[in-house]
Image: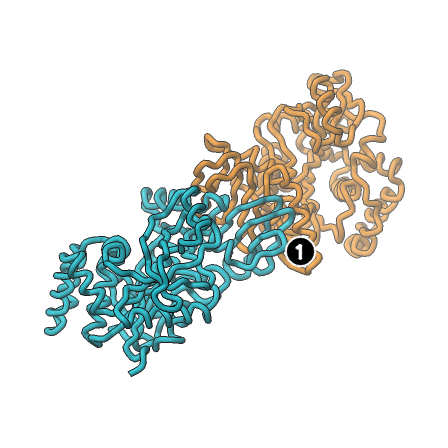
Chain colours: A orange, B cyan
Amino acid sequence: MTLTDNAYAVIMAGGSGTRFWPLSRSDRPKQFLSLGPDERSLLRGTAERIWDLIPAERTFVVTSELLRGQVEAQLPELGPSQILAEPVGRNTAPCIGWAAAHIRRLDPNAVITVLPADHYIGNTEAYVDTLRQGLEAATHGDYVTIGIRPTRAETGYGYIEVGSELDPGVFRARRFVEKPNRQRAEQFVASGAFLWNSGMFFFLASRILDAIDQHLPGLGKQLQAYDEAAKSGDEDALVQKTYGELPAVSIDHGIMEKVDSVSVVPGSFDWSDLGSWTSAWELSPQDAEQNVLPEGGIAIDARGNYAWAPEGKLVSLVGVEGLVVVDSGDALLVIPRERAQDVREIVEALRDRGDKRK
Amino acid sequence: MTLTDNAYAVIMAGGSGTRFWPLSRSDRPKQFLSLGPDERSLLRGTAERIWDLIPAERTFVVTSELLRGQVEAQLPELGPSQILAEPVGRNTAPCIGWAAAHIRRLDPNAVITVLPADHYIGNTEAYVDTLRQGLEAATHGDYVTIGIRPTRAETGYGYIEVGSELDPGVFRARRFVEKPNRQRAEQFVASGAFLWNSGMFFFLASRILDAIDQHLPGLGKQLQAYDEAAKSGDEDALVQKTYGELPAVSIDHGIMEKVDSVSVVPGSFDWSDLGSWTSAWELSPQDAEQNVLPEGGIAIDARGNYAWAPEGKLVSLVGVEGLVVVDSGDALLVIPRERAQDVREIVEALRDRGDKRK
């Protein structure tokens, strides 16, 4: 039995972020969009990359009831039982625990890679190599994460401090650090001992469920109840009834920071969590004046702008600098790049007035 | 016979400006658009205002072949013979001369007001009073123009120096001055002796044709040929054949600056020639932060912006100042207010690449 016969992928695609408004909406979050240079949606790209290593029939997607239809449409390769729709989002620990329980029933020796559906990956070959390393390390029983070599003192990411090398390319993760301030971020990068926390994990299904039993016993108990209910075909009903009661805790806080030995595989591929329109600008091909414009767009005395518009629409920017201009068809946004995070204020205003375009 | 039985209106609606791109296009110039606070198109507003004084059946529109259909659609009150379509634009002297010749054939005693179709008028009552005064003065044989009391040292307008009062509210126009530089404009405004040249005129049809014969004899000769051809129903063919050869000269340069006695009626209504998107911003109702937004628009930390979008589209501006944002459906423009004139650079770029959205 080779490594990959027991390897499973879990893609987390339940997010409902607002940071790419007006293109993303609460009912069309960014994992379903094409952002950056890839013409595929982020979800589709995530699936196709992992399928170089793990076949579609061993790929599972956790999403929400609201988004299930869009997952089915974008990943027709998956059977209905491969899409786990949460009745309500409860952060990553319940999401991953539920998927791990589901997979362990199919294969008690399963080793799982957990991947967010909405990240940018720049170099598929290097990425797949890293996944292979991570899966192999996890097969030996490690809790494994991918750390990205930082290219700047980013304050929007968590960091992982790297310890001694355990195996070639696999290191002890000494500790997880929350999003630092500017000064700490600069120290981290200067030290060379810190990596960005990518939110990608590997572990044996049995190991992560053991860890949940130990560190999040309430969640563990409920997952055992799901296993029991599954035997009599009653899991769906129980999930519907109880999922909302699961502790809303992240896998980082709830498990990875608590277990004894976490390993980290440094990834040397380009990566971004696509946190805002600024990331889309950074990652997209820019013209000589650092503008990113739809095909046929016109920029005159304009620098460092990012524009998105429906296909065929003519975007023309004159004498403006550092703007994000997004036309989603039914809504238009103009905001300085450095304020791109503030689109959430618009989404809140829309929510307050009951506008469906949130 | 009262004054108005011989009064005729000529609306000049042949312009093809690009300054309201992307809303205006070479085949949909600004006279057909609603700009500023009035929901009617500028052309429709111009016609309805003059109809308070002169009936629709004595209103003529000079336009181009390309635009004739849009004039018919917006002014269904007019018969086909009331729309004069120039085969090609030759500036205002031929346009006004042709219309005057046409009207003199109908009524040798006609007194004409000539009005641009694409101006903003703020106070209809004061405006109609001024028109009445102008027509009355013209009935006595004067060449009459309306001068607008300047509210700022505008360098985008021509000025008229005002002389002695001839009749109550009617003054000698001492001279016409081209668009001045900032310093001269400030002097003009400070002196109190200068008015903006509104481009609105009044004269007897016979008087303006006499002046054309004298000062633009080539044009005069051709207009006489049109009169001759009209007798045998051959005017259209002759116009088609020869209109392009008429001298392309403005009524200001060609006639008004040359005739002995021009009178000016100071107008005390709000007026703008709507020279750019900046004018639309100035004239439209602004919120407390001086933004002009479509209904339902959202402005957060945004000041002094003008936005236009198709009905129902949500426009949201965050942290931007002094921008013009125009979404015409098939094209999107973002430009600082103070550079609004530079939209012509985009139109030129589109023309160069053969894009029909010019």
Residue A41 visible, this angle = yes
- Measured as percent of width and height from the top left, residue A177 is found at 78, 28
Pinpoint residue A269: horizontal percent, then vertical percent.
61, 26
- For image coordinates 71% across by 48% down, the residue present is A84
Q: How many marks?
A: 1
Please identify the quadrant where the C terminus of chain A is shown. Answer: bottom right
Q: Secondary structure at mark 1?
A: helix
**Quarter the N terminus of chain A occupies:** top right
Residue at 50 percent across and 44 percent down: it is: B336
B81 or B254: which is nearer to us? Answer: B254
Q: Position of residue A336 (x, y in %)?
A: 59, 40
**Left or right for A217, reference B7:** right
Looking at this view, name the residue that lies furthest to the bottom.
B1
Residue at (66%, 29%) from the top-left corner?
A131
The answer to which quarter of the image holds residue B285 is bottom right
The answer to whether one can see residue A69 in this image is no
The chain letter under disc 1 is A
Q: Nearer the viewer, residue B269 or B229?
A: B269
Q: Is residue B331 above or below residue B49?
A: above
Q: Residues within 10 Å of mark 1 (few under 14, many from 20)?
A: some
Question: Horizontal and vertical percent for residue A153?
Answer: 68, 25
The amino acid type of the residue labelled 1 equals: Leu
In the rendered image of this protein, does residue A266 appear above or below residue B311?
Answer: above
User: Which one is nearer the viewer's eye here, A19 or B87?
Assistant: B87
Decide if residue A227 is on the left or right side of residue B44: right
Q: Which of these two is toward me, B37 or A294?
A: B37
Q: Which residue is mark 1?
A: A350
Please give left or right for residue B18 compared with residue A211 in the image: left
